Amino acid sequence: MTVRAWAWLVVGAVVFARLLSWLGGYDIVADVDPSNSGAAPGTAAWLGTDALGRDIAWRMVKATDAFVVPSVGAALVAVGLGGGLGTLGGWFGGTIERASGAVAGLPGAAPRFVMVLLLATIFEPSSVVLAVGCGLAFVPQAAAEVAARLGAMRRTAFVEASLVHGVGVARVLGGHLLWTGCRLLLLRLALQSVAFYVVVETTLSYLGALGVQEPLPSFGNMVARGLVDSRLHLVARLAPPTALWLLLSALLHVDGVVARRDSRRAT
């Protein structure tokens, strides 16, 4: 299996786990069984159980609730808002470009993680707040890169000739510039914001105060529990951090593949 296929397989497995969790079949309360505490992996629990006798494998499936859909929301905020401001600046240039750049740069006044922490502190911590915060954190980068790409393409002879010959602005901007010229760039930004959300969510859950709280599972609080609870089997301890590492590695690899394709297309 190639590295690319492996990366897509990991991403697909996470999406499938989220679908499986959505379909139901696991009760986080009914799964508590102290008499089965720290059980080794077996047919009843493939990855063993935790200190409360809860199935580690099923809790990892349920943990995808914490980041799969919210991370997509973060990507939509980053690409939608950042890409929209970048499109305005790149197409019109001049004063509009400076104004859109100034608006897009506001979230960049603080480091990304600090800005998300501020939002989570000001508002009640939730997946929506984290998604908006992580998306806003990528707005400056998205706006700047889209504006630069569109600005360069806007001045090409092909675009000028298309407009002179009566081709509509919507077709030129939407079809030729954004879709043909910027879709891979926007996909890269979306993947990066997804990976950033996963890191933020698991970090906050690991620390405890602002993240997912027990009894709800998250890769972050499962890793934290595995570090301090000696009753857990080695497999039960290693499964959550290994899954997290595989997911982030897969996202970064896919981002690298898309970046190389985008670079070849741009040149």
Image: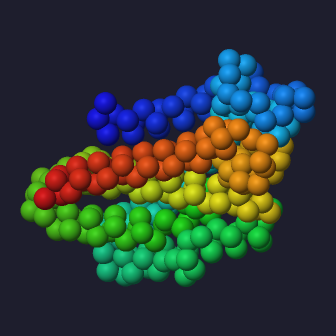
Please tell me in which quadrant of the rendered image residue 101 appears: bottom left
160 up-or-down from 246: above or below = below
34 up-or-down from 191: above or below = above
Q: Does the rendering let one see residue 226?
A: yes
Which residue is at the front of the view, 195 or 172? 195
Q: Position of residue 169 (x, y in %)?
A: 28, 54
Q: Does 6 sit left or right of 81 as displayed?
A: left
Q: Does 59 sit left or right of 79 as displayed?
A: right
Which residue is most to the top? 43
Which residue is at the front of the view, 39 or 249? 39
Please tell me in which quadrant of the rendered image residue 116 appears: bottom right
Which residue is at the front of the view, 263 or 39? 39
Residue at 21% x, 57% y: name it. Answer: 263
> In the rendered image, which quarter contains the N terminus?
top left
**How many numbered circles does the render carry?**
0
264 up-or-down from 2: above or below = below
Q: Position of residue 82 (x, y in %)?
A: 46, 63
Q: Does 29 sit left or right of 260 as displayed?
A: right
24 up-or-down from 128: above or below = above
Residue at 25% x, 69% y: name it. Answer: 151
Which residue is at the front of the view, 110 or 85? 110
Q: Does the rendering let one see residue 106?
A: no
Q: Position of residue 51 (x, y in %)?
A: 83, 40
Residue at 58% x, 61% y: name it. Answer: 134
> In the rendered image, which quarter contains the C terminus?
bottom left
Residue at 54% x, 33% y: name it. Answer: 15
Query: How is the protein colored in the picture?
Result: rainbow
Q: Position of residue 131 (x, y in %)?
A: 62, 56
